[in-house]
Amino acid sequence: MYLNNITSKKPKQILKELVIFFYIYMILEGILRKWLIPTLNKEIYFLKDFFLICIYSYAFKHKFLFDKKISKIFTIIIIFILFFGAIGYNFNKIEVLSFIAGSRSYFLFVPLFFIIIHTFSIEDIKKFVKINLYFILPYYILVLFQTYSPYDDYINSGYKSLVQNPERPSAYFTYITQNTYYFLFLITSYYSYLNCQSSLGKKKLFLSGVLIFLLMGIMILLKSRAVYVYTFAIIFYSTYINLVSNENKSLKFKKLIIILVFTPIFFIVNTSLFEKQYKFSAERINKDDYKSLSLFKEYSENEIKNNFIIRILEKFDDTDNTYSSVRDFCSKNSSICRVINEIYFVPTLKYSSLFGEGIGAGTSMVAHLRDNQQFHLGEAENHRVIGELGYLFGTILVLLKYLFFIFLNLKFFFSKKITNKLFLFPFLIFVTVTFLIGPITYTTSFISFICWFALGILFASTNENKNIS
């Protein structure tokens, strides 16, 4: 009977269910690796490849991969990246494996993005986003238990071997950065769902308050600086898009109450409830090792001569110090310095070769296969891309990525054809920041997956020129 039910469904519906299954599996993967079958940690890591091969094969068979124009453009770009990414390898047995592993780190989840834009409708995405809101409560409970449990407790498995800062909970995942991106996706889903509501009765207002309280609690318990920046950006853009929307004043007022009143109130409440955790996050601000950043090494003695920039910087500084050089700026604002360092990749150019060391050469997997580390730049994704693809094509690719997301933002801001902006703007922020700064090409973990997944949501939502209500 179950098999008959599957065979009676249309291929598009089956693919939708497979994609949702894989989304859930990517969360379960960490649970399997950390708690249920830790002895098969490495084998489970590659199990997703098998699932993806099955999903991609089915999609290819039923022509749900390359029918859209955007997927054809992406495929052409990928072919060019693979070509230039292959030049750095010598192609003996180990080098072939390294090329495959490096290509995997870049493109494992890209076909999933193709499938989403071919199969999902606005209504499908609306339902999916709503379902994600049910995941917030169990997530809150898990993070709360991890926070107050000893580091060597079973619920905190995976800390010592895979997490550098064990005082930060990793939830379902094997390291904390994945946890951060999962939270960001959930809070993006919440504000998207809120923005597109056509009515807000007492029940929805109450539930919104509960969800905001839980999300603010998770944000503080995670002790991550990035979540504060993302959340502020989403709140800012959600406020803007609601103010300029054509909704009736009563509905607009209720949404703004939730965004601008509920959110700060419940944030303050949670800072009191979790005072120790909040102070930990506050103390981490501007505590980066800025001296190791290429921006600092290259320009530390350069003077900041623009008076306007100096006045802006001093306005956010409680001391009487003045900003006379990049050294001063980085010493007082190391977190911002780190972000600028990621975006401004120019200092890396003189340390890279014309065609680079090969695609994925900076990843741990390729380093293991080659039995050497060509270079190590960690989460500095754009710098690593330059090192892997060379200063010729690597620079073109990074600039192309920047231009693509600038164009994407301009399109969503000014295009009158996109009528469901209330729903899309939080996802626009999510994908813009994650693709410009987030480490999406050196890992095949939940981070890379959720970035491509969210981009698929963004493009699939524009397939139909309808409002979400």
Image (tube, rainbow, N blue to C red):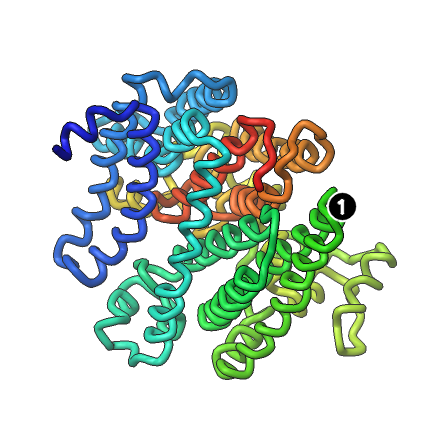
Quadrant of the image containing the N terminus:
top left
Mark 1: few/some/many CA within 10 Å (<14, 14-19, 20+): few
Q: Position of residue 145 (x, y in %)?
A: 33, 75
Q: Residue at x 53, y 63 (%)?
A: 203
* Vertical side of 12 occupied by 49: above or below: below
Which residue in the rendered view is the most extreme toward the right? Answer: 307
Q: Position of residue 187 (x, y in %)?
A: 51, 56
In depth, the one of 164 and 52 nearer the eye is: 52
In depth, the one of 79 and 60 nearer the eye is: 60
Residue 397, picture quadrant:
top right
Q: Position of residue 226 (x, y in %)?
A: 54, 60
In depth, the one of 235 and 303 nearer the eye is: 235
* Vertical side of 207 occupied by 73: above or below: above
Q: Is residue 409 left or right of residue 108?
A: right
Residue 14, picture quadrant:
top left
Q: Position of residue 267 (x, y in %)?
A: 58, 72
* Vertical side of 297 occupied by 372: above or below: above
Q: Is residue 159 left or right of residue 218?
A: left
Quadrant of the image containing the C terminus:
top right
Q: Residue at x 37, y 76 (%)?
A: 147
Q: Residue at x 50, y 34 (%)?
A: 122
SS class, disc 1? loop
Report the label total.
Answer: 1
Which residue is label 1 attached to? 244
Amino acid at circle 1: Val
Q: Is residue 175 visible?
A: yes
Q: Residue at x 60, y 56 (%)?
A: 200
